[in-house]
Image (spheres, grey):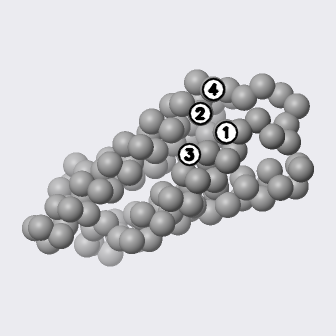
Amino acid sequence: MELLRHLVVLIHLVGFAVLFGAWVVELFNGKRGITRLMHWGLAIAGVAGLALAAPWGIEYDLNYAKIGTKLVILIVIGALLGIGAGRQRKTGSVPAGIFWSIGILTFANAAIAVLWR
């Protein structure tokens, strides 16, 4: 059971890496747009995160305040991706505030996972 939980953690980290990596690529290539890869990374990280929020394969109590905070940030990132993709379709570009918010919130979500014990 512990091995399965570690595999889900790995999948969760891959989802974060896909989302944040796609954002960094868009930052450095100068386009600053929303890609399908960002949506996939969010979906992978979200589904794996929800699986990790279930109390299976552990002997300790979960930190529900941390889980709730990360879930709210995940929902906000999803909303920003949706709004940004819509604006990109309509005008051809994503507003800088939306683009930067996605990257900052994604990084903050990872920081919360690592630093909040």
Name the residue carrying label 1.
53
> On the image, which quarter does residue 67 sit in?
top right
Q: Amino acid at mark 2?
A: Ile
> On the image, which quarter does residue 58 sit in?
top right
> On the image, which quarter does residue 95 sit in?
bottom left
Q: Amino acid at mark 4?
A: Tyr
Picture residue at 76% right of the left edge, 35% below the top? 55
Name the residue carrying label 4.
64
Q: Do residues under tags 4 and 2 come within 8 Å of each other at their CB atoms?
A: yes
Mark 1 or mark 4, earlier in chain:
1
Q: Amino acid at mark 3?
A: Ala
Residue lying furthest bottom: 29
The spot of residue 110 in percent (x, y) is 56, 45
Secondary structure under tag 2 reads helix
Q: Do residues under tags 4 and 3 come within 8 Å of each other at their CB atoms?
A: no
Picture residue at 62% right of the left edge, 63% below the top? 14
Q: Give the left or right position of residue 28, taking residue 114 as reference.
A: left
Disc 1 versus disc 4: distance between alpha carbons? 8 Å
Disc 1 versus disc 3: distance between alpha carbons? 15 Å
Q: Is residue 116 above or below residue 111?
A: above
Name the residue carrying label 3.
110
**Quarter of the image containing the C terminus?**
top right
Residue 67 marker? 2
Disc 4 versus disc 2: distance between alpha carbons? 5 Å
Secondary structure under tag 4 reads helix
Q: Is residue 92 above or below residue 67?
A: below
Mark 1 or mark 3, earlier in chain:
1
Front residue (pair 102, 84): 84
Nearer the camera: disc 4 or disc 3:
4
